[in-house]
Amino acid sequence: MSSEMLVLFLGSFVETLIMVGLSGLIGALLGIPLGVALNVTEAHGILPHPKFNHVAGLVVNAVRSTPFIILMVAVIPFTRLVTGSSIGTAAAVVPLTIAATPFVARLVESALREVDSGLIEAAQAMGATDAQIVRKVLLPEAFPGIVAGLTITLVSLVGYSAMAGAVGGGGLGDLGIRYGYQRFLPDVMAAVVVVLIAFVQLVQSLGDRLVLRVSHRGQSAQTPP
């Protein structure tokens, strides 16, 4: 591989990092509160609100069920409004974030459901407010599951970012399509695939280690001296 191609490869990898990192961060900032809202407004939640839960659930399901490549095209007007363009790394972050937010929300909602209801009832018996129950019971107890969910989201975003490259989003996907496929350079395509696989393995390994660490920390905090 020539030095020029190595420079392109490095630039594409940085673009992929930016797309995955920014969309994952913004998706988490939006998705975690949405997941909490979905959980607490369930029929058996601490703030039951069936209408809100139903409408929010429909929106989340609609976005999650839309194939990403179609979602990218559908939100082009919004992408242009936000970034001023429909192509490039910055533009790709918009649909990636829209795809990540409901994905995170459902995973957070699922993690919160695993919290022992006895802990919630005990907190309510001690006079804790709803906000205190969320901050001091639900989120801390579900934290390992939330971290695992965010790891799954980042792994999915790596794949989505490659699809974004196929329609002008930049990153490794764009490099693989333009050089590996259109210019018939199989070594470039193979290198892109290897790097993406290694990147996914790294993200998954770091996420698994973090889950184990926070799980052990939580068990140690609950263990009486």
Image (tube, rainbow, N blue to C red):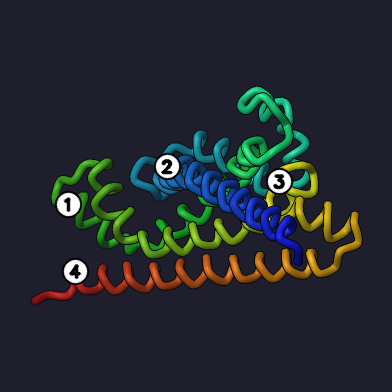
Amino acid type of disc 3? Gly
Mark with earlier residue (2, 1):
2
Cα–Cα span, label 2 and label 1: 25 Å
Camera-nearest residue between 172 and 71? 172
Q: Amino acid at mark 2?
A: Pro
Residue sitting at 71 percent across and 54 percent down?
162
Alpha carbon of mark 3 to alpha carbon of mark 1: how far? 54 Å
Circle 1: element type: helix
- Please identify, in this view, whether the residue under mark 2 or under mark 1 is nearer the observer: 2
Q: Secondary structure at mark 4?
A: helix
For the residue pair 52 and 135, the one nearer the viewer reads as 135
Residue 160, x across and y down, in percent: 68, 53
What label does residue 108 carry, if any?
Answer: none
Binning the other alpha carbons within 10 Å of mark 2 as few (below 14), some (14 to 19) or many (20 upward) gives some
Disc 4/disc 3 C-alpha distance (Å):
45 Å
Q: CA distance from mark 4 to mark 1?
A: 22 Å
> Which residue is identified by label 1?
125
- Residue 16 vs residue 26, the one in the foreground: 16
Mark 4 vs mark 1: which is more N-terminal? 1
Is 196 situated above or below 95? below
Q: Which residue is mark 3?
A: 170
* Residue that numbered label 2 is attached to: 33
Q: CA distance from mark 4 to mark 2?
A: 25 Å
Q: In the image as oriented, which residue stretches furthest toward the front?
A: 3
Closer to the observer: label 4 or label 1? 4
Q: Position of residue 33 (x, y in %)?
A: 42, 42
